[in-house]
Amino acid sequence: MDQDAAALALLAVRTLAIRDLRLATSESLTGGGLGAAITSVPGSSAVYLGGVIAYATPMKRVLSGVPAEVLAMVGPISGLTAAEMAFGVQRLTGADWAIATTGVAGPEPQGKHPVGEVWICVVGPRVGTVEPAVQAVRLDLVGDREQIRRDTVTAALRVLVTMLSPV
């Protein structure tokens, strides 16, 4: 894990703890790296409920609750799939916040999706009748497989921290 990811994970855990909020993750290409970054922070057990690694496409439906129609329509690598993964793990765990990652780390493209195409979605809590905060981000990363996975973890934590920051 790089220093940026470590610093962002620490900030996220501290912010969630101060606000008494819980977090869950649904990961594909990061394969548990996001959960590992979060749990490397002492005290993370107070805020991190856990996550799923939905690496194979069918597991996005089974573990993360992505509707079969979404997978059939847009496939496993899209903003909509990332959003459904985040909402699914949020429902599954009861977390206030959820992060999902999906994309192509390489070494080969996946269908029409090039190496480095990554989608991150962060979902916040629903407050009363106000819709939850949702941000889906597409990244076009460069580097080898491990660099793309590391950069995805860092970017996902950055999106979470930005969304947690007061306006």
Image (tube, rainbow, N blue to C red):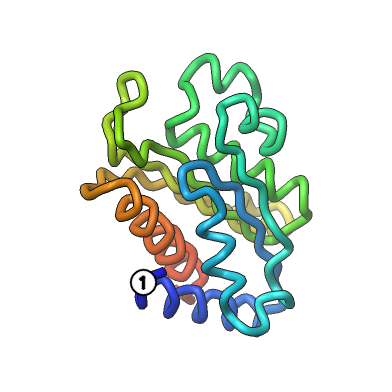
Determine whether, in the image, residue 154 is placed left or right of residue 14.
left
- Does residue 125 lie above or below 88 as drawn? below
**Quadrant of the drawing holding the C terminus:** bottom left
- Does residue 55 lie above or below 47 as drawn? above
In which quadrant of the rendered view does residue 69 lie? top right
Q: Residue at x 64, y 19 (%)?
A: 68
**Rendered location of residue 159, percent (x, y):** 42, 61
Q: Residue at x 56, y 37 (%)?
A: 55
Determine whether, in the image, residue 132 is placed left or right of residue 144.
right
User: For the residue marked with disc 1, what is the amino acid?
Assistant: Asp
**Rendered location of residue 12, percent (x, y):** 53, 75
Mark 1 secondary-structure assignment: loop
Kindly give the residue lying farthest to the left in the view shown: 142
- Does residue 80 lie above or below 127 as drawn? above
**Rendered location of residue 120, percent (x, y):** 44, 48
Mark 1 = which residue? 2
Q: Residues within 10 Å of mark 1 (few under 14, many from 20)?
A: few
**Quadrant of the drawing holding the N terminus:** bottom left
Choose between 164 and 98: the one closer to the eye: 98
Q: Residue at x 78, y 55 (%)?
A: 94
Report the label total. 1
Choose between 120 and 35: the one closer to the eye: 35
- Does residue 164 lie above or below 103 as drawn? below
Determine whether, in the image, residue 15 is placed left or right of residue 145.
right
Choose between 65 and 104: the one closer to the eye: 104
**Rendered location of residue 75, percent (x, y):** 48, 22
Determine whether, in the image, residue 131 is placed left or right of residue 146.
right
Q: Residue at x 61, y 32 (%)?
A: 60
